[in-house]
Image (cartoon, rainbow, N blue to C red):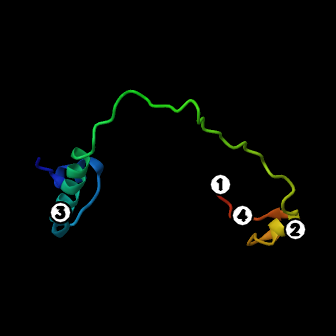
């Protein structure tokens, strides 16, 4: 299989220097070779009904930090609020 890195970089709109095309072709070819050597997967799903997966329960922690502790990390605080750069004129 011939991999045309120039064509792929044009489609992806990625600028690749001319001296790096050969390296990328070798790398891409090794990826394709690895994928071609992957074993086939049976479509039948194997589930062990005697050993069901148990998911943890997500619990939100509240009141872990005080407001003062959180504000110490802010670069600028004014009147108890975070000061951020103006983004809209």
Q: Residue at x 60, y 35 (%)?
A: 52
x, y percentage for residue 37? 22, 47
Query: Which image quadrant for residue 72?
Result: bottom right
Marker disc for residue 68: 2
User: For the residues marked 1 and 3, what is the alpha-carbon distance in whole angstroms?
Assistant: 43 Å
- Indicate the secondary structure of the residue bearing disc 4: loop
x, y percentage for residue 56? 69, 44
User: For the residues marked 3 and 2, what is the alpha-carbon distance in whole angstroms?
Assistant: 54 Å
User: For the residues marked 2 and 1, what is the alpha-carbon distance in whole angstroms?
Assistant: 29 Å
Indicate left or right for 86 with 83 as reference.
left
- Indicate the secondary structure of the residue bearing disc 3: helix
Q: Residue at x 28, y 37 (%)?
A: 40
User: For the residues marked 4 and 1, what is the alpha-carbon distance in whole angstroms?
Assistant: 12 Å
Marker disc for residue 21: 3
x, y percentage for residue 61? 81, 52
x, y percentage for residue 51? 59, 36
- Sequence-wise, the earlier of marks 3 and 4 is 3
- Sequence-wise, the earlier of marks 1 and 3 is 3
Question: Which residue is label 4 attached to?
Answer: 84
Q: Residue 40 or 78: which is nearer the viewer?
A: 40
Indicate left or right for 81 with 38 as reference.
right
Question: Which residue is label 1 attached to?
Answer: 88
Q: Nearer the viewer, mark 1 or mark 3?
A: 3
Query: Which image quadrant for residue 38?
Result: top left
Q: Residues within 10 Å of mark 2 (few under 14, many from 20)?
A: few
User: For the residues marked 3 and 4, what is the alpha-carbon distance in whole angstroms?
Assistant: 44 Å
User: For the residues marked 4 and 2, what is the alpha-carbon distance in whole angstroms?
Assistant: 18 Å
Q: Residues within 10 Å of mark 3 (few under 14, many from 20)?
A: some
Query: Which image quadrant for residue 46?
Result: top left
- Sequence-wise, the earlier of marks 2 and 1 is 2
């Amino acid at each position: 299989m011939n991999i045309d890195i120039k064509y792929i970089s044009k489609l992806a709109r990625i600028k690749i220097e001319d001296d790096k095309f050969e390296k990328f072709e070798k790398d891409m070819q090794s990826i394709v070779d690895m994928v071609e050597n992957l074993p086939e997967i049976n479509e039948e799903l194997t589930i062990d009904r005697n050993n069901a997966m148990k998911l943890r329960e997500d619990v939100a922690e509240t009141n872990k930090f005080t407001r003062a502790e959180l504000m110490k990390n802010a670069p600028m605080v004014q009147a108890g609020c975070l000061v951020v750069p103006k983004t809209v004129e």
